Image (spheres, rainbow, N blue to C red):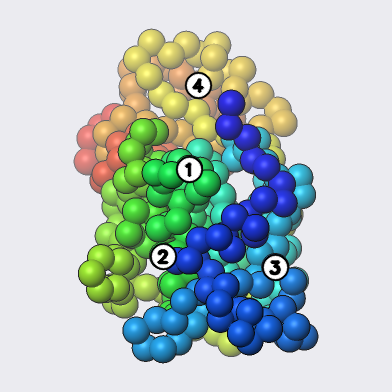
Amino acid sequence: GLAPEANKLVSSLKTMPMLHDEAYAQETKLNNFHEFPDNTLVLPASKQKKRIFYTILELSPLLDSSNMTPEDWAKIAKKLEEHYEKYDGFVILHGTDTMAYTASALSFMCENLGKTVVLTGSQVPIYELQNDGRANLLGALLFAGQFVIPEVCLYFYNKLYRGNRVTKVDAGSFNAFSSPNLPPLANAEVDITINWETVWRPNTKKKFRVHTNMNRNVGLLRIFPGITAAAVKAFLQPPIEGIVLETYGSGNAPNKREDLLEELKKATERKVVILNCTQCLRGSVTTVYATGQ
């Protein structure tokens, strides 16, 4: 099956004219300049006669995104912090299966972010003849290199999303991601259109920092018809310290199931934090219905 392959990306990108202008690199002896590290590539000139230079930093070992853990989020965050002052923006290449998780996690791990951070990937490997990787990488580079959107974002299929508002919705389409409760921050069609009124604007000039101390004793508990109290009890046992309770509709759960309510009550008495979240893609939690109170 498909698996990540180390030390292949740079050599492949150098053969793709839309992602690297080799003639310009040779003409200017790009890699002889001390300010440009090894593995630095350059995009063709834009209509405004500007170029974006980008350097590839490959983490080791490369992972299928299904194997990502919070420790890997911390590794990425620390790399952002290490190189923060050297670059104008950052693109993180990531497998699609857990890319939304990483984007959301990084958005909360990065404090005082003043530069554009864009996660992207592809449904089909960039080395294949028919793929979405080249367009996604190019779009991500254009946003990170041309605009100051000081958020952790996710770019896919011509749309730039807020990183903590996006989810993967399709396993077999290039249009694989959606942000059901917030419009895209930007669209890259014939022209690039940015919804500046939606973009988060920083309100501080404090130094950028990352938070990597995360609690692993949290989980997702999804309510479904017929769920047993025994299953809920087992899930809530120590060392669990917090759960996201995925409920029906606008935050509703069975209020005639005293056995379930009793287990949830016991958990709160042990100081377990319980956050109510709807299972629906759109909408939010309210207390309109008795079962949601």
Alpha-carbon distance for marks 2 and 4?
A: 51 Å
Q: Earlier in the sequence, mark 1 or mark 3?
A: 3
Helix, strand or loop at label 2? It is helix
Residue 21 in view: yes
Of badges 2 and 4, nearer the viewer stands 2
Mark 4 packing: few (<14 Cα in 10 Å), some, or many (20+)?
A: few
Residue at the spot of label 1? 128
Q: Amino acid at mark 4?
A: Glu
Q: Earlier in the sequence, mark 2 or mark 4?
A: 2
Residue at the spot of label 3? 39
Mark 1 packing: few (<14 Cα in 10 Å), some, or many (20+)?
A: few
Tell me the number on the disc at residue 262. 4
Residue 42's spot in the image, x, y percent? 56, 75
Q: Earlier in the sequence, mark 1 or mark 4?
A: 1
Of badges 1 and 3, nearer the viewer stands 1
Residue 253's spot in the image, x, y percent? 34, 27
State if disc 4 and disc 2 touch (CB < 8 Å). Answer: no
Q: Amino acid at mark 2?
A: Gly
Residue at figure coordinates x 67%, y 50% from the top left: 8
Residue situated in front as seen by the camera: 19 or 81:
19
Q: Determine whether 108 is above or below 234 in the image.
A: below
Residue at the spot of label 2? 139
Helix, strand or loop at label 4? It is helix
Residue at figure coordinates x 34%, y 15% from the top left: 225
Alpha-carbon distance for marks 1 and 3?
A: 22 Å
Residue at figure coordinates x 72%, y 31% from the top left: 239
